[in-house]
Image (spheres, grey):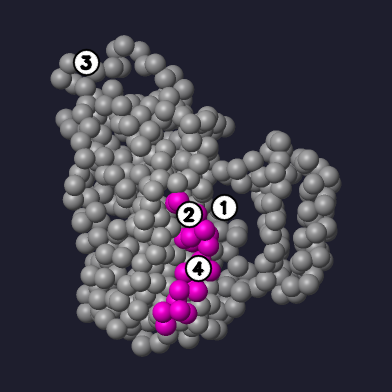
Amino acid sequence: MKKLFGTDGVRGRANLYPITPEIALSLGQAVARYFKNGKTTHRIVIGKDTRLSSYMIEFAIAAGVCSMGSDAVLLGPMSTPGVAFITKAMRADAGVMISASHNHFEDNGIKFFDADGFKLGDAVELEMENIAEKQIMESSDRPVGKSIGKAFRVDDATGRYVEFVKRTFPKALTLDGYKIVVDCANGAAYKLAPMILWELGADVIPVAIKPNGVNINHECGALYPEGMAKLVQEHGADFGMALDGDADRVILCDEHKNIVDGDKVIALCAIQMAMEGTLNNSQIVGTIMSNMGVENYLKKKGIGMIRTPVGDRYIIEEMRNRGLKLGGEPSGHIIFSRHTTTGDGLIAALQVLAAMVRSKRKLSDLVSEIPLYPQVSTKITVREKVPIDEIFKLKQAINTLETRLNGRGRSVVRYSGTEPVLRIMIEGEDAALIKKELGVLESVALSCLT
């Protein structure tokens, strides 16, 4: 079993295990060693978000990379999808993103991409852990003299990525006449997002664009879209978008300040792509958390949904295995495989904006008929992540709940991949029923796990 890696890289409180300079250095060594191939030039791309601790982790990873004879290419503040793109564009051996995504600034994380810009599979992560655990490599593994790597910064990385993202928006279209509020979460896209929208012709109202190392995701961004929605109403804007700290997810808002989450974005884009003939096999990929109402709506439109565990890398793996073009989750990770290799909040927002411009319809109109079943959820802090199938009383309560829902709803009980918590979600047609049942299930879980 993996010890360091969770559902999305390595994550935790910065400067405490496993997000320490020592672990970061060993992971830098591991990525350089694992991905070294027959080329004479070896590069590992390293990007980061705006957290205070990202400096510490960046230099530690770079030291590890250089100690194994590879060059560390430092991008500075860059979105997670931007790192994936630059890694592939530069033909680097691999890419590293330093970010804890939507978490508060005290946390940090380390994500990895292969040379093609895809997140690593479980087997590769396990092998990387095995290499990192050795920490002090055998002397025969360590280059010396001129073979030691160097670190350098790439000044035009932002411009490269901006041009790439703009190319995903149809060339014949423009955002001229659209007023857009963009909440950058004081994160990695604080320069990127406003620049892209402005260059496409929009009247841009940027917020949360003054990172100071500790304000990333602080009451702003994708976890707090209400602030963005309020500004849409105040400015009479046509559209609002809130990114998270590393800009791989987005939550939207229509002109009436109604929040539009990832599920509705996926449904809207699935319908648009089906009309264009670009939705392979009339299928999309969601997760166990994707709303049942959206699944049933798409089914009536002849579009099937395949579910995976939570985490965009699992969605991407399924999309690659089946050759599908669209996938995502309610949190706002949306993947358009014809454009990119990972979730990209900016690209997702531009696809929705393109649908609005083409149809000359407002976002509220485009999503008006997409239903969402009511959902209720809670989380419980646990001492130990005992397999749920081994907790008889809890398993029995879950089975009883499914019987009561009788096909008109469902439940998801799972452990977080990044925190010591059990998450419980229930959705269904009857809001009062699922609220009542959540209380019952939570009581059982508390009695078993705390």
Instruction: Please report the residue visible at 68 percent of the width from the left and 47 percent of the height from the top.
Output: 422
Identify the mark nearer the N-term, 4 or 2.
Answer: 2
Q: Which residue carries the number 1 mark? A: 309
Crowd rating for badge 2 (residues with CA inside 10 Å; few <14, some 14–19, many 20+): many
> Which stretch appears magenta?
215-236
Q: Foreground residue, 84 or 158?
A: 158
In the rendered structure, find residue 227 and report the number of the disc placed on it: 4
Question: Relative to the observer, which residue lies in front, 249 or 415?
Answer: 249
Mark 4 burial class by Cα count in 10 Å: few <14, some 14-19, many 20+: some
Q: Report helix, strand or loop for mark 4.
A: helix
Which is more N-terminal, label 3 or label 4? Answer: 3
Position of residue 358 in the picture relative to residue 257 (left or right) = left
Q: Would you name the residue on which mark 3 appears?
A: 144
Residue bearing the label numbered 2? 217
Which amino acid type corresponds to the residue marked 3 in the rendered image? Val
Real-space CA distance between mark 3 and mark 2, rounded to the nearest whole angstrom: 42 Å
* Image position, residue 395 (x, y; %): 79, 49
Q: State if disc 3 and disc 4 touch (CB < 8 Å).
A: no
Classify mark 1: helix, strand or loop. loop
Q: Is 127 part of what is drawn in magenta?
A: no
Tag 3, which secondary structure? loop
**Location of the N terminus (image quadrant):** top right
Of the two numbered discs 4 and 1 in the rendering, the one whose residue sits closer to the viewer: 4
Task: Name the residue type under label 2.
Answer: Asn
- The Cα atoms of the two marked residues, 4 and 2, are separated by 12 Å
